[in-house]
Amino acid sequence: MRSESSRRTFIASLAAMLAPLSANAATEPLCPTDPSISDPSAPLTIDTHAHFFNGSDLQIRAFLSGTVVGKDSELYPLVNAMGSVLQTLGWHLAPSAKDEMRAIASYAASLKNCASPVEARTVAMPSFQEGYAIGSDQLRTAAEVLYQAPSGASVLGPKGSRTGLGAVIDDLPKTYDEYEQRRNSGASVMGSHPTLSGYVRFILHNFNHRHVNAIDYLTTYSKNSPRKIDLVVSSMVDYDWWLAKGKSTPTSLSEQVDLMAEISILLGGRMHGFVSFCPFREAMTIGSDGMGDSLRLVKKAVETRGFIGVKLYPPMGFAPLGNKGLKVWKGKPGLPAAAADPDFGKRLDAAMRSLFAYCLANEVPIMAHTNHSNGPWEDFKALAGSQYWSLALQAFPGLRVSFGHFGDTDLEDHGGAKTREFLKLISPTSGSAGANTYADSSYFAGVLTNQTKISQTLQALYAASDNNVLFERLMYGTDWTMILPQRNVDRYLSDFTDVMRRIEKDQPSITARQTSLSNAFFGKNAVQYLGLAAGQPNRRRLETFYALNKVPEPDWMRKLG
């Protein structure tokens, strides 16, 4: 029988876990009725795939030096153009979790006067300026250093000219407001170089506070739009064991989870996180209870911090299942010695099985990177393949999974060939292995450049799906912040709206989930995937989170009822 002291300790620990997050100075929602991002009458819109991190959350130097960023990578244009600059930047200077907590706390006085016409962006402008000042200073310093190198001019362009990357960096003004004006003005050096300006914008975001990036996202896509982003899912990543032998990022994963929870409160439930899971970390940190640090983090995030799912990144070096017997880790310098163990694949499978069992039992959705890109080694990229997900779904039928990027970010260039392998795993049959499989449209850059071709490709995929099941399983996603280097990225939502209208015009009889194809794609499909309907476990967990942290009912919840 448990002793009285143990019982008291257990009760105290449980109370601490369920207590509101900010015991000293509770975070309050920032301008919840800001009309630029809130419209209760607009159709439900959910972005299932985004990222709001900064340079202190990532192994950026190790990623740049140790990852194969080939032409199939979403980051290829950026790294190809700016690799030398990226390596020179002081990423550690990005705001830490503690820095950001202080910034959020500073809004308390302003929030008391946050009437409906006031925009969240206005209240948060000091934080916008803080990150911009750090990032722009780092870019200017990096440019000066690079100009001294023999290859500097080839990367930056002639010094003092009005063309090239160096000219765009030199055009960075002192204030964030001025930067926004120049970025949107075709008459400025920055505005006349939209591609290079996109690269610079991506870098600046990695020196921002995370909530600043989230507010920038919300206002970019909701302002002056018939759709408002009611909910955006922000995914974390964990590369520590694959790229840094277990060394933590400057802002640890646990700190990131706590901070993202605060941002969920600050944004009034408009943003919730997907916590990262790494089977390497799990295998290396197994405790006497049979659980490792990665699954502990998942449980903390989902059960007490308002997170609504789990993010996986297989190209880092693991398959969803089927690692046993693989030899892809053999002879890979830079990996910890444990990866050379003959049983390493078996240990990874055990970790993945633990995660899948937890997610299946608690109806926690999973999103996985399925584009064959951004692995430390070329043969690691194949670990994101559909054949490994087939094994996982056969072992855990009904697992709720979204195939991030739907297997290919350039699907219109490949006729959807890579995507079709994942399409085979999406089943309309209740009780089947793929009964709860979905896919997202994140980083479909063709939406910005060739709407006709991507409309045709999507129509072909819809038609090829089993019993037209894709009408109810394909979801909207952006992959913000990663998509920022793309030209005209601010049009992603409006251009995707046009793509769906084209499809509906060609096939006017299509409906899905008792609504239009557009409304299913932009909102209703994600509701089912994320478990947001009344009575579902994720919805109940969020209702508890909102009640404990005094978050008013968000727009997405009011629209669902």
Image (cartoon, rainbow, N blue to C red):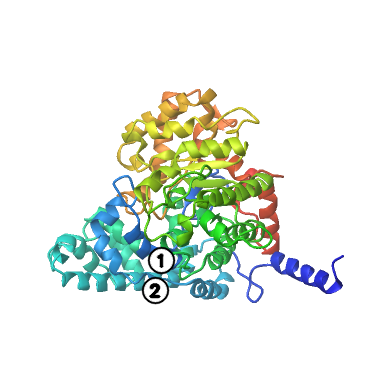
In the rendered view, does 133 fall on the left or right side of 384? left
Question: What residue is rendered at 51% in x and 49% in y?
Answer: 345
Mark 2 touching mark 1, by CB under 8 A? Answer: yes
- Front-most of 110 and 257? 257
Q: Residue at x 55, y 43 (%)?
A: 44
Tell whether 69 sits left or right of 7.
Answer: left
Residue type marked 2: Leu
The image position of residue 287, as x and y in percent, is 64, 62
Quadrant of the rendering where the N terminus is positioned: bottom right
Answer whether residue 41 is visible to the viewer in this image: yes
Query: Of the numbered discs in the image, which one, if any, rests on residue 438?
Result: none
State the image coordinates of residue 110 (x, y, percent, origin top left).
54, 72
Q: Which residue is mark 2?
A: 93
Gap in angstroms between the C-alphas marked 2 and 1? 8 Å
Q: Secondary structure at mark 2?
A: helix
Residue 298 lies, in percent from the top left, at: 60, 57
* Badge 2 density bin: few <14, some 14–19, many ≥20, Cα 10 Å: some
Quarter holding the C terminus is: top right
Looking at the image, residue 428 lies above or below residue 373: above
| Quarter of the view holding residue 239 | bottom left
The quarter of the picture where residue 170 lies is: bottom left
Image-based side of 399 in relation to 103, left or right: right
- Label 1 crowd bin: few (<14), some (14–19), many (20+), radius 10 Å: many
Which residue position holds label 1? Answer: 55
Q: Secondary structure at mark 1?
A: helix
